[in-house]
Structures are given as C-alpha cells and as structure tokens.
Image (cartoon, helix red, strand yellow):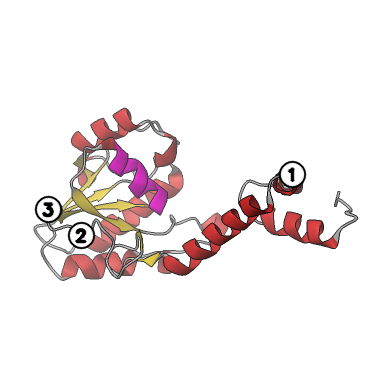
Amino acid sequence: MRQEFESRLLENCVTEISRLPGIGRKTALRLALHLLRQEPATAMSLGNAIIEMRKGITYCKECHNISQTELCPICANGRRDHSTVCVVESVKDVIILENTGQYSGVYHVLGGVISPIDGVTPDMLEIDSLVERVERGGINEVILALGATMEGDTTGYYIYRRLAPCTDLKITQLARGVALGNEIEYTDELTLGRSLKNRTLFSDSIAM
C-alpha cells in the first residue's frame, strides 16, 4: 500500500531512495527521516558525494571495471600479469577477488550473466569485447570466475564455446570451493583465494 506524505519534498525523496536495489518505501522513509534529523551539511555532503561519483567515475575501455581514467589502475599496472584474464560478473566481484590477495592478473567485467528468464541475453553483456580482447593476442589463460549458479554455469559454457576456436588458450574456472548455488560476493575471501589457486580446466568439469 502506498504511503501518503504531508510533504511533497519528503515524498519525492522517499520515491528516489526507494529506487535503489533492496530498499522498499518503508526503509526509504526511515533513511529520509534520518537525514532530516541530521545537520543540513550531512545531507549536502551525501548528495555531493553521489553527484561527484556519478560524474567522475567511468568504465575502463579494456576490462569495463570502474575507473576515473581511460584505463583502470589494474589494467594500467605494468606489474600485473596481463596474459591472465579473470572473467567476472560485476565490479563488486573485482573488489572481492582483489581483497583475497591471491591474484595478480587482470580482469574482464561482463556486467551480468546470461539469464533468459530475466531477459538478459549474451549480446547485452561484454562477451564480444572479451573475444576481441583474446583475439588481439597476448592472453594465455582466461579464468571463468562466475557464481556457481545455473546462470553462472550457462554464461561460462557460452564463453567457453565462443573462445574454443582460440588455439593455445587455456580456459579455467574456480575450483568448486565455491558452494553450489553461491554468488562470488557471498563467498569468504579464504575460500575464494583457495578456489583461485586450485582452479581447474573448464573442459574437464563441464556438466552440460
């Protein structure tokens, strides 16, 4: 049931906050009222931080990670192993895998996973750019670090089929220390680190 507000300004604020994922109108109202109880500078600081983030952050032209420059700091780092590319679903997964301290290669962010039920098709993801990146040469291994879900497995298999014609390319996936049905973001860093170290050839573990 839609809430009625005395103030149009409050209603507009609640409506905008409730657009964020996982936040309903009740939670949005609680957050809005919390901001009203703070000093005006607090709300201004939050608003400015959001505006500056949206204006200042773009996406890396190479891996599609967030960046404030044309190339993200990881892709621009000459000390990283650019011959190994770890394919992940989202920017959040890059942050989580970096926190393990177990990976020194570079990344490729798909921007999602294939999910017909949600209307997400391969052409909506950064799969073509991954294939082009591999075809340019210099990449020896692609690690499919996708969630152990049906959507993650479907996406991994699709990418595997697209990259299969690339000779001398090793395609691996995380060892199944990641529990079946789990997304990367819900897996602890120790388990992820071990899964990276013990990754297996994708062709040896296809169950499709």
Q: CA distance from mark 3 to mark 1?
A: 48 Å
Q: Is residue 90 visible?
A: no
Would you identify the image quadrant in which residue 96 lies? top left
Find disc 1 in the rendering and name its residue. 37
Q: Is residue 21 above or below residue 56?
A: above
Left or right, 74 with reference to 56: left
Q: Helix or strand or loop: what does disc 3 sit on? A: loop
Find disc 3 in the rendering and name its residue. 79
Would you identify the image quadrant in which residue 12 lies? bottom right
Q: CA distance from mark 2 to mark 1?
A: 58 Å
Q: CA distance from mark 2 to mark 3?
A: 28 Å
Q: Helix or strand or loop: what does disc 1 sit on? A: helix
> Closer to the camera: disc 2 or disc 1?
1
**Rendered location of residue 20, percent (x, y):** 62, 53
Residue drawn where x is 69% and y is 59% of the image: 16
Q: Is residue 63 visible?
A: yes
Q: Is residue 29 above or below residue 19?
A: above
Q: Helix or strand or loop: what does disc 2 sit on? A: loop
The stretch of residues the image draws in magenta is 90-99
**Could you say which is closer to the camera, residue 60 or residue 32?**
32
Residue drawn where x is 27% and y is 39% of the image: 174
> Closer to the camera: disc 3 or disc 1?
1
Q: Amino acid at mark 1?
A: Arg
Would you identify the image quadrant in which residue 191 lies? top left
The secondary structure making up most of the magenta span is helix
**Rendered location of residue 55, percent (x, y):** 48, 69
CB within 8 Å, label 3 to label 1: no
Q: Is residue 124 above or below residue 188?
A: below
Dot 2 surroundings within 10 Å: few (below 14), some, or many (20 or more)? some
